[in-house]
Amino acid sequence: MSTARPTPTLYIEGPAFWSPALPGWETARAVFRGQGQPADPPARRPSPQLLAPAERRRAPDTVALALEVSSAAIAASGRDAKDLPCVFASAHGDLGINDYMCGTLAADPKLLSPIKFHNSVHNAAVGYWTIGTGCNAASNSLTAYGHTFAAGLLEAAAQCAADGQAVLLAGFDIPSVGALGTVIDSRELLAVAVVVAPERTARTVAAFDWSLAAGTPATPRALTPASEALASNAMADALPFFEALARSEAGPLDLPLGDRLALRLQLTPQG
């Protein structure tokens, strides 16, 4: 009988978080720990300094969010972005642009904006990131509908374990609008990021052992009210993970990959 090869322990650095009510990891961490309040009034969309001013103005919400949390995660990890492979995960990509494109194609295709078409592709955000940082390492862009963050973390962990190299993971989704909003339910703006590393460093915040668990995923603990307010965003499957990091919680955490499969984590706070 064959035995599954055990997966190596991996490490989390540089958690980053952005939503209008929780604009940055320090704010989110304090709120998740019951030591702070959400931003009032809510923050405006981030303006990624990685881009030139003209590109910054034209960048859609998905790009702005992804670059904001990715830059924050890299800064907190102390690593060089150009050296890190990256995984960018979004359940739906840019729903606003896709709704615009569908409407324009139906009404008058000749009016379709080349810039909006360029920004509509699912890997637009990771493209901006790799160009802006000069990163020539491997980059992936993926989706797994309501389990996209879990799939992204599994991909980042597998790459990190296989290659022995740190990997940047960013997840982001935006509200659905227009006709697409009648079939896709996503609300609010939400973006998250971490660096998954093969070894512990001075910047490590948690270690995790990981495996795939068949059967019904374990029910996570109840979310804080701040996270509940973001539960309608398509990236909401990331919330239990980031709350656990914020509260330095040890123990198991199931991130569902489907109805009968989960990414099972055993978290151990560090530092």
Image (cartoon, rainbow, N blue to C red):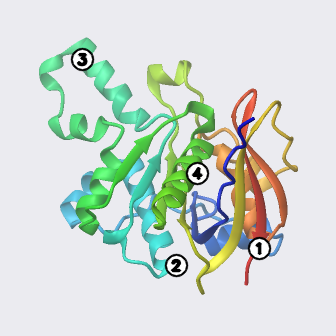
CA gap between label 4 and label 2 equals 18 Å
Q: Which residue is mark 1?
A: 269
Which residue is denoted by mark 2 in the rendering?
76
Residue 69: tell me if it is visible. Answer: no
| The C terminus: image quadrant | bottom right
Label 4, label 1: how many angstroms apart (C-alpha)? 18 Å
Q: Amino acid at mark 4?
A: Leu
Q: Residue 232, percent across and down? A: 67, 38
On the image, numbered disc 3 is attached to which residue? 105
Using the rendered view, name the quadrant where residue 52 is placed.
Answer: bottom left
**Horizontal side, residue 238 vs residue 54: left or right:** right
**Rendered location of residue 39, percent (x, y):** 65, 66
Mark 2 or mark 3: whose residue is earlier in sequence: 2
Q: Residue at x 28, y 64 (%)?
A: 135
Q: Position of residue 57 (x, y in %)?
A: 27, 57
Q: CA distance from mark 3 to mark 1?
A: 51 Å
Q: Nearer the viewer, mark 2 or mark 3?
A: 2
**Which residue in the protein does label 4 denote?**
153
Question: Could you classify mark 3 by the number of other residues whose Cα lies within 10 Å: few (under 14), some (14-19), or many (20 or more)?
Answer: few
Query: Farthest residue in the front direction?
Result: 1
